[in-house]
Image: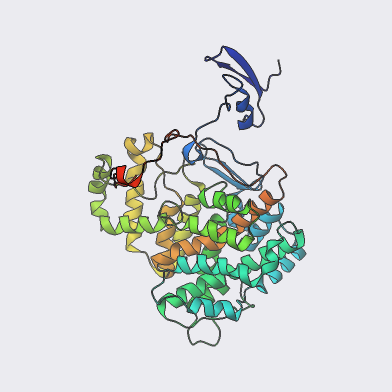
């Protein structure tokens, strides 16, 4: 019997089934062979939220949550954050290798010259209410680009695909900045092609009446590092949304908008905003022990600690903590930082949290840094969406070119009624109206 197999005994029938094991997995369709009889559909797995189901094979991002490892295309995240720019990392994620100097120069030039937004799209954004949430504007405007570039529907044409990828990477900072300027009632600022990717975003956010915006290099580099850390994170909720919507062969603008919509939830991209609310609730460093005590008694959650994947210290959190020190040398120390440091110190020494493997994650410090840089909390998820667009596009392209992938269509376990007799109106009883 081959060694890379698993044998299953069906105790309902007494029959044995030998299934091949590849890359630590068995094919879910192989389970369909396990039947009680010819009319049996076959065995399925029931896995709410995909806790133990692989939906694809990917070569983009590797995570070992138990060891606290994150790698893009084989490169440790800490090495890339130290030595690369965001657009270098974007190239790596999309094409599989770090660019040479000439390749990087061409790549930067191509992305830079896609930062302008069509005037009709600008007018579309002007139509939002004065108090529209920036993330709602971002999602809607990215989706609207589908109408500006109809050729993007040809998702199987490599040249067209690449053109849309460059457009999206170039335009999402412009859309994000315009969303912010709209929310504060400021006129939109056009891109400046003399600036780096992060500097240009800062220019479009914060330029006022000065002839030329001069970005602080420390803040610009910190923002670039944060972009690198958020560029991709394997098969998370929004990447899964990108793949699921893209599997219908929807164009990349609509697929990216769907992914951004998934990101907008407080359990995903909005988690760092929840951390700030928690720190505001704690109020001061002296209140941390009492807050920790309340958490252990079941009163609330410790936001920014723990992760669905990481059961060790999130490697991105270490880099963000280092970045925070550089930022606060420029901006001055944020009062929330003292609370956060004390919260982390106590939690990492407390058996309650250590036994549950509740370590700081990427959201714990990122909100504090963003706020220190001058971003309002409602912009945090939009900031997340800018770099994550690269990861979504890498996942989408990998999915589109994978011959095994088909339109996403999970199975269900039926728990409803069998066939029912129709009830005439006069014989019906009121249905319960409680939310299900």
Q: How many marks?
A: 0
Q: Residue at x 60, y 76 (%)?
A: 117
Give percent across and percent down for residue 250.
63, 58
Q: From this view, report whether residue 9 is shown above or below residue 358.
A: above
Say which of 300 and 42 sits in front.
42
Give percent across and percent down for residue 2.
71, 18
Q: Quadrant of the N terminus?
A: top right
Say which of 169 and 6 sits in front.
6
Q: Residue at x 47, y 34 (%)?
A: 414
Give percent across and percent down for residue 253.
61, 63
Task: Give the image's coloring scheme.
Answer: rainbow
Q: From this view, report whether residue 206 is shown above or below residue 87.
A: below
Query: Can residue 215 be seen at all in this image of the molecule?
Result: no
Q: Residue at x 56, y 67 (%)?
A: 142
Location of residue 128 (image quadrant)? bottom left
Say which of 36 and 293 sits in front.
36
Location of residue 394 (image quadrant)? bottom right
Query: Can residue 36 be seen at all in this image of the molecule?
Result: yes
Q: Quadrant of the C terminus?
A: top left
Horizontal side, residue 95 vs residue 173: left or right: right
């Amino acid at each position: 019997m081959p060694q890379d197999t698993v044998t299953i005994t069906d105790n309902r029938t007494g029959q044995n089934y030998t299934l091949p094991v590849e890359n630590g997995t068995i094919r879910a369709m192989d389970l369909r062979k396990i039947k009680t009889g010819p009319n049996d559909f076959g065995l399925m797995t029931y896995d709410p939220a995909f806790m133990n189901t692989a939906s694809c094979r990917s070569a983009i991002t590797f995570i070992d949550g138990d060891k606290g490892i994150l790698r893009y295309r084989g490169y440790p995240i800490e090495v890339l954050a130290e030595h690369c720019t965001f657009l270098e990392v974007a190239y790596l994620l999309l094409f599989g290798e770090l660019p040479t100097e000439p390749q990087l120069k061409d790549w930067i030039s191509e992305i830079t010259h896609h930062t302008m937004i069509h005037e009709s799209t600008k007018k579309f954004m002007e139509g939002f209410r004065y108090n529209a949430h920036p993330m709602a504007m971002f999602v809607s405007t990215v989706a609207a680009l589908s109408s500006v570039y109809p050729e993007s529907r040809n998702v199987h044409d490599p040249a067209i695909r690449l053109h849309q990828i460059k457009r999206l990477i170039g335009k999402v900072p412009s859309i994000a900045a315009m969303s912010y300027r709209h929310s504060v009632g400021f006129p939109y600022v056009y891109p400046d092609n003399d600036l780096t990717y992060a500097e240009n975003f800062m220019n479009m956010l914060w330029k006022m009446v000065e002839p030329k915006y001069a970005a602080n290099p420390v803040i610009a580099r910190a923002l670039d590092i944060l972009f690198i850390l958020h560029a991709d994170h394997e098969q998370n909720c929004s990447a899964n949304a990108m793949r699921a919507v893209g599997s219908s062969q929807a164009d990349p603008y609509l697929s990216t908008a769907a992914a951004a919509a998934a990101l907008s939830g407080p359990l995903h991209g909005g988690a760092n905003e929840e951390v700030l609310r928690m720190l505001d609730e704690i109020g001061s460093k002296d209140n941390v022990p009492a807050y920790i005590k309340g958490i252990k008694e079941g009163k609330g959650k410790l936001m920014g600690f723990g992760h669905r994947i990481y059961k060790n210290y999130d490697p991105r959190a270490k880099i963000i903590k280092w970045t925070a020190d550089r930022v606060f040398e420029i901006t001055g120390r944020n009062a929330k930082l003292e609370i956060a440091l004390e919260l982390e110190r106590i939690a990492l020494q407390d058996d309650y949290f250590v036994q549950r493997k509740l370590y700081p994650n990427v959201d714990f410090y990122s909100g504090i840094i963003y706020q220190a840089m001058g971003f309002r909390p409602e912009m945090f998820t939009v900031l997340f969406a800018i770099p994550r667009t690269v990861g979504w596009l890498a996942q989408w392209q990998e999915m589109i070119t994978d011959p095994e992938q088909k339109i996403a269509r999970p199975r269900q376990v039926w728990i409803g009624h069998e066939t029912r007799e129709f009830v005439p109106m006069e014989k019906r009883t009121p249905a319960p109206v409680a939310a299900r």
